[in-house]
Amino acid sequence: MKFYMTPGSCSTGIHILLEEIEAAFEVYLVNLMAGDHLKADFVALNPKSTIPVLVRNDGSALTEFQAIAWWLARTYPRAKLVPEDAEGQARVIELMDYAVGTLHGQAFARLFTPSQFAQSEAEHEAVQAQGRERTARGLEVLDRALPSDGYAVGDFSIADAAIFYVEFWADKVKLPLPPNCAAHYRTMLGRAAVQRVLREEGYRVP
Ligand SMILES: N[C@@H](CCC(=O)N[C@@H](CS)C(=O)NCC(=O)O)C(=O)O
């Protein structure tokens, strides 16, 4: 498989899942700062110009964090990346979607790419302040859904990979993690696959 990713971005969550299942894949680095995602060859692959993208062995490209995570979980069942019962699966999707759709898409995105939400550069600071506020509020909501110890929904699942990357971002921008998020982040940092991914993406593992 071919995995299109950017170190330290949301694709880090998918990178973790690929390591967890011990899949064979090649990494294709997409330099967002340099605008690689807007170049014709990448747009041909993903007209949304976003990473992550996973090109499977049949040559087809899959986009969107949740879709890729779900496909990996269903295609590599031995890794047990989702619970077997409907309640557990629904909780996993609920949390994964909150991390990706709300915390990332509505909160961190305002902080990292204010231009996507502002009419002019003069508004950037206000948009970023709103992003910070929404992130703090979103982490509080997430905190109430997480246990004080262990993974989000019983055993490790695709939800943990999504939650991890938003916690990682909070850590990088020095936004305090509420207690259950902090415990979850520490648990994730203890996983061998997470440590491998962070090293491969150029980070020091604490
Ligand atoms: N809904 C998409 C969001 C992906 C996304 O926003 N990725 C960011 C990097 S973390 C990106 O590609 N940004 C480039 C852009 O939107 O122009 C998903 O779940 O994959």
Image (cartoon, rainbow, N blue to C red):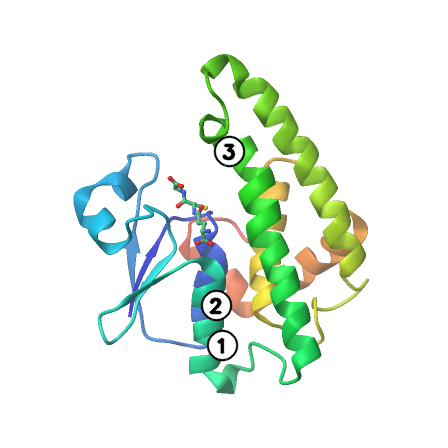
Residue type for callout 1: Ala
Answer whether residue 206 is visible to the viewer in this image. no
Q: Which quarter of the figure has residue 92?
A: bottom right
Image location of residue 194, percent across then percent down: 53, 63
Looking at the image, residue 13 sits to the left or right of residue 90; the answer is left
Report the front residue among 139 and 18: 139
As displayed, is residue 133 above or below residue 169? above
Mark closest to the chain's N terminus, 3 or 1: 1
Q: Is mark 3 within 8 Å of ligand 1?
A: yes
Image location of residue 125, percent across then percent down: 57, 19
Q: Residue at x 24, y 47 (%)?
A: 43
Answer whether residue 129 is visible to the viewer in this image. yes
Q: CA distance from mark 1 to mark 2?
A: 6 Å
Mark closest to the chain's N terminus, 3 or 2: 2
Residue type for callout 3: Phe
Question: For residue 112, which numbered disc appears in the image?
Answer: 3
Q: Quadrant of the N terminus?
A: bottom left
Looking at the image, residue 160 sits to the left or right of residue 41; the answer is right
Residue picked out by circle 1: 73
Circles 1 and 2 in contact, beta carbons < 8 Å: yes
Residue picked out by circle 2: 69
Is disc 1 placed on a helix, strand or loop?
Answer: helix
Image location of residue 78, percent across then percent down: 50, 87
Q: Which quarter of the figure has residue 106?
A: top right
Q: CA distance from mark 3 to mark 2?
A: 23 Å
Circles 3 and 1 in contact, beta carbons < 8 Å: no
